[in-house]
Image: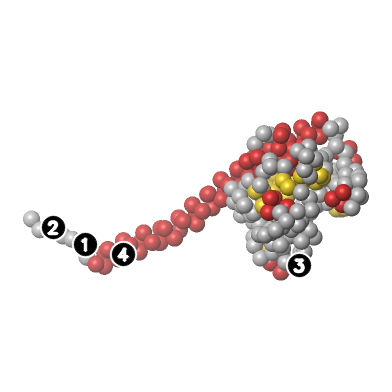
């Protein structure tokens, strides 16, 4: 019996069909993977919210400070808002978003030399609780504290939850960057806290995950704004590059209630 083999044309057709299917399916797989990462990130931000509420409950409804010097080890170290909430979850892994695991390097920012050294060693070393982090904080809620030497001996006192007119709408943590050398026009220690670096999209399928002052977390949509800078879409922070500021009773955003 004679067996009929595939012709060259038939093989090429099969290869073309496989290539077309791959071109269709690969983006679908990529989207599915990013959806999974977004879900994991949302879980992280929810844990941030739970930890923040536990902290607030322990400290008479006051939110932690942004950063201040700690001398418990005998040398000056920078104690950040993240150091304040990590003990309540006992897992520094919540600091990391799988879509941007090394987007911010705390130890490098504190260092006195390269590769970054934005603070030039002036804040001391890290507390050692984390190095990389993927989230930023609303530093209108997490104040500096009176007499903070990091801020020239000034600084505003810690904020009480009762002072927030709209706790469910005021963000406290979100996907973002502690800006400095990565952001054009930002000098060392002249920091911003954008949801995305200029020229790059928001981290999760045109949006970011965010935690709010009452502890809940949600996905916040974003859009590509002027100059390729991504901004928040919808809600009180609409059109802003940061989820920064306190939402007042009239819906406006301000540094103070």
SS at badge 3: loop
What residue did someone put label 4 on?
A: 13
Precedes in sequence: disc 3 or disc 4: 4
Precedes in sequence: disc 3 or disc 2: 2
**Within 10 angstroms of label 1, few (less than 14), some, or many (20 or more) residues?**
few
| Rendered position, 17 above or below 163 | below
Who's the residue at 24% across and 67% down the image?
8
For the residues marked 3 and 4, what is the alpha-carbon distance in whole angstroms? Answer: 53 Å
Q: Nearer the viewer, residue 56 or 223?
A: 56
The outermost residue toward the front is: 74
What residue did someone put label 2 on?
A: 3
**Within 10 angstroms of label 2, few (less than 14), some, or many (20 or more) residues?**
few
The outermost residue toward the top is: 58
For the residues marked 3 and 2, what is the alpha-carbon distance in whole angstroms? Answer: 71 Å
For the residues marked 1 and 4, what is the alpha-carbon distance in whole angstroms? Answer: 11 Å
What residue did someone put label 3 on?
A: 185
């Amino acid at each position: 019996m004679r067996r009929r083999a595939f012709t060259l044309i038939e093989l090429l057709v099969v290869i073309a069909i496989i290539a077309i299917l791959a071109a269709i399916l690969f983006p679908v797989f990529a989207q599915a993977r990013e959806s999974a990462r977004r879900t994991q990130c949302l879980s992280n931000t929810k844990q941030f919210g739970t930890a923040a509420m536990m902290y607030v409950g322990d400290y008479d409804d006051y939110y932690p400070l942004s950063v201040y010097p700690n001398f418990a080890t005998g040398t000056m170290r920078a104690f950040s808002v993240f150091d304040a909430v990590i003990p309540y979850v006992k897992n520094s892994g919540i600091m990391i978003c799988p879509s941007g695991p090394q987007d911010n390097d705390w130890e490098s920012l504190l260092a006195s030399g390269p590769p970054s050294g934005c603070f030039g060693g002036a804040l001391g070393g890290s507390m050692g609780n984390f190095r990389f982090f993927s989230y930023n904080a609303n530093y209108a809620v997490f104040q500096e504290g009176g007499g903070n030497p990091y801020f020239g001996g000034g600084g505003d006192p810690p904020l009480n939850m009762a002072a927030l007119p709209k706790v469910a709408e005021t963000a406290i943590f979100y996907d973002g960057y502690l800006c400095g050398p990565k952001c054009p026009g930002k000098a060392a220690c002249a920091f911003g806290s954008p949801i995305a670096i200029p020229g790059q999209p928001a981290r999760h399928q045109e949006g970011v995950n965010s935690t709010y002052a009452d502890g809940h977390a949600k996905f916040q949509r974003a859009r590509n704004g002027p100059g390729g800078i991504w901004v928040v879409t919808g809600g009180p922070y609409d059109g802003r590059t940061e989820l920064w500021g306190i939402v007042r009773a009239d819906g406006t955003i301000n540094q103070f209630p």
